[in-house]
Image (cartoon, rainbow, N blue to C red):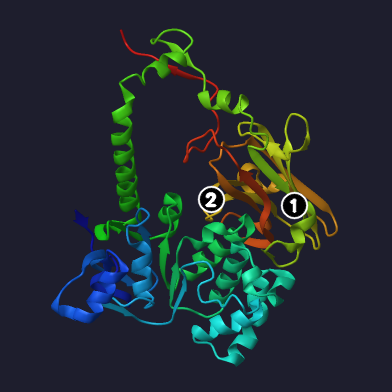
Amino acid sequence: MSLGTTTKPAQEIAISVENLGKCYRIFGNPKDRLKQAIWRSRKQFFREFWALRNISFEVHRGETLGILGRNGSGKSTLLQLICQTLTPSEGVVTTKGRIAALLELGSGFNPEFTGIENVYLNASLLGLSKAEINERLDAILSFADIGDFISQPVKTYSSGMAVRLAFAVITQVDPDILVVDEALSVGDAFFMQKCMRFIHRFREQGCLLFVSHDISAVSSICDRALLISNGKMQRLGSAKNVTQEYIKDIFSESNASTDKTDNGHNTNNITARTSAGLNGSIWIDYRTERINNSNLANFLEISQFEDQLFTSESFGNGKAEIQSVMLIDAVRNQPLLVGLGGENVVLRIQGKANEDICHPVIGFLLKNDKGLVFFGENTLNAFEQSAIGQVSSGQIYWAEFEFTLPLLPPGNYSFTVSLANGSQSVANQLHWVNDALILRSNCQCIGAGVAGVAMQRITFDTSS
């Protein structure tokens, strides 16, 4: 077992956990519970189950700690102890500042109250006065974006709507410590992107505890990570090292299970994918074959939001505005609504200048639902400024980026697009639009973590 040490000793400690443990009494039947109440500590009619034991770590202000572990490992118990919704059986938890937590769907909500009533209730529990809630109410409702349902009882909400409202309250209570469990996984693509942008801003100053089974999210968001197994600390260290340990543990158990039924015949698949022997053989990319032979009519859904651009989150100085964003099939020159991955596509971004623009720049980023950037490009990288010239006020201008659509693992992805002017060192954002296009991958034939362009051919050779 390898335990790391605190990496930021000079910063203020926001959370301190010392020898923390939580023990539950497990009774064989209801009669044993009654007997225990009568005999008290003189006789024991239960067995002890330690959900957590000997947990110790510190988290500093401005630091993000990811918590990893399988289901039942004790992650949620640890968060509840830190949030003081559970009492520890042993050890001490010390926190400094206001804690806001999103632990379970609907936690802190009264299902009989309306959404607006629950906003006041939840925000009050988090320490806001009624005057402060009134002042921030519009911002909360805008972030939640559940429309007229805000006046309906929460018991009529879907799980996604409940999370929207709960997270919207959290964004306006100015927490010092933010605790986020897996609840965000039920949100839609637009809401996930909005939440991740808030989290990225918050982690610059606040202390964030982030629980997720998504390895890429923990790696990209967290400074350090804690791996818990069977209620005990397995490893505490950098996010990269701990996630690698977590993956190793998962695959070790998976391989042990596979070895029992393998019988040593896996190598037959290798020769089945070659066209001629081993030496100098040509490999046909099995992913392309499986995709083309599948019955997945909507392997990759692409939502064109040209008419909804004005409702997306955006900012800029107003000197130009994005009018349309389209993903086009490069062969048919038609808007692409369904794809497989591996197609040549064109991303077309069109804008209108409201003032004269001396050095116009158009660019984009492709992100996953955790805000992690996959790739991006802009015209400043491709052209010299003198080659583009000036765009006059009232003039329409656009850029087209042609590339191969990646093979994307299951999940939601989005294009963020921008109009700017200036140089690589100094750029002014004229109009920036988040989530201009949404890509929803329903892929069932590619293993998790596969991203990139499908290979048309792979050659393997060995020396004689």
Mark 1, secondary structure of its residue? loop
Residue 166 got which mark? none
Which amino acid type corresponds to the residue marked 1 in the rendered image? Phe
Q: Residue at x 73, y 57 (%)?
A: 358
The answer to which of 59 and 462 lies nearer the viewer is 59
- Please state the horizontal and vertical placement of residue 148, each as a whole percent of the image: 74, 72
Residue type beneath disc 2: Val
Q: Which element type, helix, strand or loop, lies under badge 2?
A: strand
**Residue highlighted by disc 1:** 305
Vertically, is 64 above or below 275?
below
Label 1 vs 2, first from the N-terminus: 1
Closer-to-camera residue (249/387): 249
**Which residue position is annotated with label 2?**
373
Q: Residue furthest right?
A: 394
Mark 1 against mark 2, which lies toward the viewer?
1
- Residue 220, given in percent of the width and then of the height, sits at 44, 55
- Return the residue found at the far front: 31
Q: Is residue 10 visible?
A: no
Tell me how many marks there are. Answer: 2
- At 33% from the left and 32% from the top, the residue drawn is 258
**Residue 310 location (% of width, % of height):** 76, 62
